[in-house]
Image (spheres, rainbow, N blue to C red):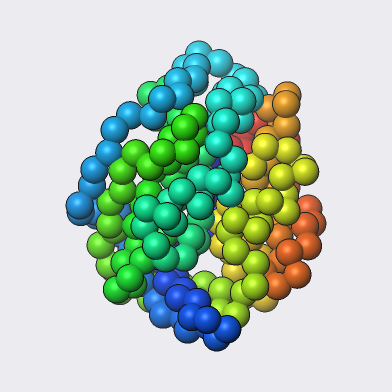
Amino acid sequence: MKRRTTAIAAITAVALLGAGTATTVAVADSGSSGSSGSHSSVRIKDDGVSDAQENTNEAKGAKVKAEDAIAAALKHTPGVAVGADLDSDDGRLVWEVDVIGSGNTWHDVDVDPGTGKVLGSHVEKADDDDAGDAARVASALKGASTSAEDAARAAASKGTVTSVDADDDGSVKVWEVETTSADGKQQDWHVDFQSGAVSVDHSAGDAGDDGDDD
C-alpha cells in the first residue's frame, strides 16, 4: 500500500556537523546483514478489505506519530533519517525508518507503531551502480534545514502522516509526505527542505484514487 517514489536504491548519507554540513553518499541494494527484531504489537485487517479501508486501518493503528517513530529510530541508530513509511506485513503494522549512520551505512530500523519501541534493524549493502542517482539526492539534501521529523510535523495538520521521504527531481528540493484522512483518502504533499512550507504535490495526480497506491 505504500508509495515509495524516492530514489531509495540510491539513498544519501548526510552527516550534519555542528553549524556546518558535510555530505557523503552511500548507495544500497536489496541485500542486508545484521538483522534483528520481533513482531509489532499492532494488528490490522489488510486482507479482503478495500484500499481505502486498509489505509484507514493503518492510519488508526498508528498510535505513534511519524516524527516520534523517527526520533525512536535515531535514538537506537544515531545518524540522519532520510525516510519513514508506515506499512503492514501479514496484518502487522510497523514504521520502517531509513537512517544513514556512521561509516555511511544505511540502516532500516523498524519501530512499533503502538509502543514506539524499536523492534530491530538491519544494514543494507552498498551498490555503486546507483551512485549517480545518489549524488543527485545528496546535492538536494546538502544544507537542508528541514529534517524528516520537521517535515512530518509540518504536514500533520493535513491528516495522519504515513510516509516521509526525501525527493529531488533535479530542481525541486522537498520532502515528500503522504497523509491519510479519516475516510482513507490519501494525499501527497511537498515540504520545502529550507522553509518547511507545505504545498500540494501536484505531480502525484489524483492522490485520492485508491488505485494508485501500488
* Residue at 24% in and 53% down: 32
Q: Where is residue 210 shown, x and y percent of the image?
A: 65, 31
Mark count: 0
- Nearest to the observer: residue 77 or residue 90: 77
Q: Looking at this view, name the residue that lies furthest to the left.
A: 34
Residue toward you, 19 or 84: 19
Q: Residue at x 48, y 60 (%)?
A: 81
Q: Position of residue 3 (x, y in %)?
A: 55, 45
- The structure residue drawn at horizontal position 60% and vertical position 56%, both measured from the top left corner, is 149
- Classify 25 as above or below 1: below
Residue furthest out toward the top: 48
Q: Is residue 209 visible?
A: no
In the image, taking residue 138 as reference, residue 143 lies left or right, namely right
Residue 23, above or below 193: below
The quadrant where residue 184 appears: top right
Instruction: Please provide percent x and percent y for residue 167.
Output: 59, 64
Residue 77 visible in the shown view: yes
